[in-house]
Amino acid sequence: VTKIGVLTSGGDSPGMNAAVRAVVRTGNYHGLEVYGIMRGYSGMIEDDIFQMDSRSVANIIQRGGTILKTARSKDFFEPEGRAKAYENLKKRGINGLVIIGGDGSFRGAQKFSNEFDIPCIGLPGTIDKDIAGSDFTIGFDTAVNTAVEAIDKIRDTADAHDRLFIVEVMGRDAGYIALHSGIATGAENILIPETKTDIEELISSLTEKEKRKKLVNLIVVAEGDEYGGANEVAEIIKKRLPNADTRVCILGHIQRGGSPTCLDRLIASRMGYHAVECLLNGRFNVMVGILNNKMNYIPLDNAIKAKQKISEDWLKIVKILAS
Ligand code: ATP
């Protein structure tokens, strides 16, 4: 491998810039030419590719979003689109790729590396932490800290008015943001896609708490929970507890932006460095993860198939601490 490309794909996440910086600087350190590819696979197909040097990634480690922009490319699903992308890499002599994105992006990378002789390394860049094989994904820590900060503020106003607040956080298929932010803010209940919620149990626990004059209640709901989000959960609760002053707050896209936390900068830097090492050492078509504080390399195929499981331990802790 002599010339490598780096791209960010799928949903953006804070820390992607830190990963790009690490890839460019580690590549340069080893004498590789490094090319930035704009807007994920779209830029690869549209030939929006430029050479990067150490200076081009100066002053970005602290910035949210991604300087390479990101996109979802329909054309990359088609063999013709991928062939065009390959031609654009080939004419520059790019013979290795680092893809920073989620499982969809890895699926694209896996197809591409099977069809063409270009090794791909995946870095888990997603706020959802929904990828197996790594304790961390780039952006999760920042997103969850943003959610915690926002929920703390909501708690203040909930307290002042004795309200029941139902807060929706991101997570269509994965409940990690809800679980972690809910535990960290002392939520009464956390509704996540991975588990079933007994709504009767929830109602009776709210009723019981009302009797005990525990008036401030916070429920954190992942957008992909079984009822379809905070508004839907609120409808059910309002019908059953018409006297409760129930409000909904949907945090939305603030969870994606902002300056990455120290942890996200660290893991992005570490993963970016190891992505280049993988390409240099012939460890091809893997996702670079960190497991038990050690680097973990899993074939892209496995990274796609397996999802993280929520540990039973956490679920028990939620129940006990909310009483
Ligand atoms: P997030 O988890 O934030 O949604 P993601 O990487 O999973 O990020 P996707 O939109 O699923 O986001 O995928 C990003 C891009 O990867 C797609 O727009 C497409 O270009 C490519 N891609 C995804 N799946 C495939 C596939 N099966 N074949 C080819 N390309 C794919």
Image (tube, grey):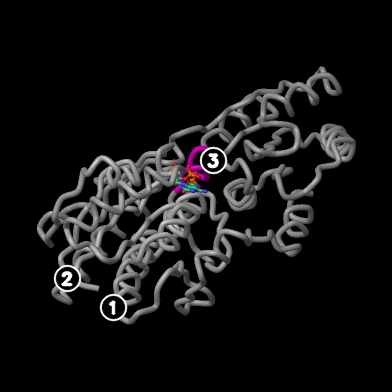
Hey, what amino acid is under mark 2?
Leu
For label 3, the residue is: 152
Residue 152 in the image: state x and y as whole percent: 54, 40
Q: Is residue 66 above or below residue 163?
A: below
Magenta-drawn stretch contains 259:
no
Hey, what amino acid is under mark 1?
Leu
Hey, what amino acid is under mark 3?
Asp
Tell me the residue at 30%/54% (across/down).
86
Mark 1 beta carbon near ligand 1 (under 8 Å): no
**Residue 96: quarter of image:** bottom left
Distance between the alpha carbons at the discs numbered 1 and 2: 10 Å
Tell me the residue at 56%/34% (across/down).
156
Q: Is residue 286 above or below residue 241?
A: below
Near mark 1 (Cα within 10 A), the count class, few <14, some 14-19 or many ≥20, is some
Residue 90 in the image: state x and y as whole percent: 23, 58
**Residue 215: quarter of image:** top right
113 horizontally vs 244: left or right: left
Distance between the alpha carbons at the discs numbered 2 and 3: 46 Å
Report the magenta residues as a range: 143-151
Residue 81 in the image: state x and y as whole percent: 37, 43
Near mark 3 (Cα within 10 A), the count class, few <14, some 14-19 or many ≥20, is some
Front position in the image: 317 or 24: 24
Front position in the image: 78 or 185: 78
Tell me the residue at 35%/76% (across/down).
278
Label annotation for residue 32: 2
Label annotation for residue 280: 1
